[in-house]
Image (cartoon, coloured by chain):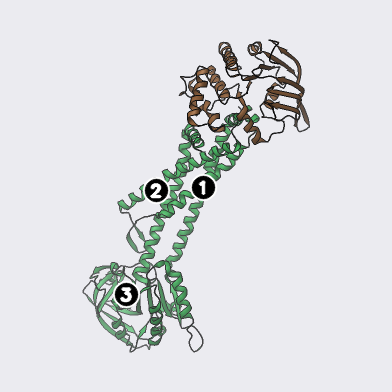
Chain colours: A green, B brown
Amino acid sequence: MLNILRLAARNLKRYRRRTFLTSMLISLGVVAVLLFISVSGSFKVMMVGQITDSMLGHLQIHKKGYLASIDSLPLNRNLNAKQLKKIEQILAEEEAVEAYSKRIKLGAMFSNFTETTNIRLNAVLPAEELKTAPLLTKRIIQGQQDGLIEKGEILIPELIAKGMKVKVGDSIVLVANNKDGSVNGQTFLVRGILEGISGPGGRDGMIHLEDARALLRIDGVEVSEIAIRLKNMDQLADVFARLKSELGSIMNQQDKPVFEVHTWEKISPFFNIAKMIDLMTFFIKIMLVAIVLVSIMNVMIMAVYERINEIGTISAIGTLPNKILGLFLVEGLLLGILGTAIGTVISLVSIAIMNASQISFDFGRQTGLLLTPTIAANEVITVVLVVIGIAVLASLQPAYKAAKMDPITALRHV
Amino acid sequence: MSVIVAKQLEKTYVAGDITVKAVQGVSFTIEPASFVSFVGPSGSGKSTLLNMIGCLDPPTSGSLEVVGQDISNLSRKEAALFRGEHIGFVFQDFNLIPVLTVFENVEYPLQMVQNWSPPERKKRVQELLDAVGMGDQGDKYPGQISGGQKQRVAVARALVTNAKLVLADEPTANLDRETANRIITLMKKMRDEFDTTFVFSTHDPRVVENAEIIFNLEDGKLIKSANSEGDRHA
């Protein structure tokens, strides 16, 4: 085997320019795929992390039908005390749950005493919310981050802050209708400005849950949604299935389900973007396979054609057909390894350079997002193995042709 | 035991509607350590005969024994193994492997065909290179040596496996007169040294006049055989 390897390496060295160009073509393909995987993958992970860890949580529980009418923030579809108690019992028994946060979602009129606009708000208990959405404080671009929010304070979205010229420390008034239609108003102190992010709820303000209860004149216990954070995101599908099974079996008097459970994937449109990124990655991998297949096959066909006489000679001397087959397969293998090795090194260096360069980008209304591409070892190994495998596969037909060549015909070839 | 025993050898090629009888009813015997030449014009069947003796092309009919083994019906793999074990080849165009050095070219059959151990290989290859006068050229590549030197290396490669039989198809066709004479002299010397049988196909008079046994072929038939020494070889 070592002899075949040495001979194959010498033959590749013999056609240096062709070996160089082919391996560069393979390298280019490997670089394109690895960089795309790293950049798109990092973007996806960052966006998913931001969406789940600073806003949605991993799962949400609502009263049945709430999500379908979420645009109108219906207060009459809030969960009541009894329902909430049932949910909390189930969540307490679920070991995979790290934390959960009860929220009231409401719409209100926002006034800075000279102008008025509409605002959507999440009312939360700060301790619960911080455990459920730990990155939320990072979205506070102005004002105090610690503690999130106190009673009588409001975090306002940056677009409203800019539009209404409201600063941290200003007083504003919220006027809201309760579910019976009566109106109530309350003054709040602006504690901070919240950075907007993509997706539902990404441009909502925030107040304390007790303030929402007072503003909406809620006597008992009511919440619009429960956002859940899991200990491990990988358990999402299992926990979702369990919660759906347990909560879905609870029926009202009309024998219809009381609750609905959704994963962040169902709630955020970014999940479809993430799926599109995965699809694009798949097609780019297919393109890489095609590049490797065509380039190696082309080179190996040429190699066999140019060395017909040589094949005849070694065959006449007594070289067995399987050794001739092995010789050309190993040439393809070495080309694949060479191209992949160069491509992988270039990719990893490029990723390191991109990270060191602190490249920023904009996504939707979010600006200055930092590009931090990373790539998992298993992704690199997969690409490397696929390329090398395809290189050998592409060499198979020319190698087989060489092994089956009639020595007399081959020796006569000029 | 004769090195080659051919009885009523026939070789017919069929291409579409055309049938060509390349070799017709040829019988002969060649004894060990002979220096034999098949002579004839182009198309007389001498290369076909050499290909059949060399297990490169099976006869259509008749029997052919080489070093005591019937080779008329060998499979492709069996034929390759037989060639690697018993037959050496010298080609008109030298056919050295360009990516291997002179030493490695001679070493090739021991390494890729017969699996000799490295120390044995090294000793044997150097012995053969010394014998053909190329002992100090082992590190050179075929592109760095002359045609005559290449053919010397080819002779060494053919003999390195202790082959009983060396087949040489027009070995001097691409060499000038002086070099051709040196190669013929070298091959005779190798025959004497290693007791190897050399069989040529040629129409080079320089080879013919040096051959000890001459088989004349015409239209695939053996028309005459001559023995220049008239004693031990035919």
Q: In the rendered image, which residue does mark 1 sit on?
A: A389
Q: Which mark is residue A347?
A: 2
Residue A390 pos. (x, y %): 52, 47
**Disc number lying in front (3 or 1):** 1
Q: Is residue B141 above or below residue A360?
A: above
Q: In the orientation shown, which residue stands out farthest toward the front?
A: B1
Residue depicted at x 36% and y 47%: A349
Front-most of residues A395 and A362: A395
The reply to whether residue B100 is visible in this rendering is no
**Disc number lying in front (2 or 1):** 1
Q: Quadrant of residue A188?
A: bottom left
**Residue A154 located left or right of residue A294:** left
Q: In the rendered image, which residue does mark 3 sit on?
A: A129
Quadrant of the image containing the C terminus of chain A: top right
Residue A167 pos. (x, y %): 23, 71
Q: Quadrant of residue B85?
A: top right
The reply to whether residue A67 is visible in this rendering is yes
The amino acid pointed to by label 2 is Ser
Looking at the image, is mark 2 or mark 1 earlier in the sequence? 2
Q: Secondary structure at mark 3?
A: helix
Front-most of residues B229 and A127: B229
Residue A270 pos. (x, y %): 42, 65
**Residue A342 located left or right of residue B48:** left
The amino acid pointed to by label 3 is Glu
Front-most of residues B144 and B231: B231
Residue depicted at x 65% and y 10%: B209
Label 3 packing within 10 angstroms: few (<14), some (14-19), many (20+): many
Looking at the image, is mark 3 or mark 1 earlier in the sequence? 3
Q: Secondary structure at mark 1?
A: helix
**Residue B97 located left or right of residue A115:** right
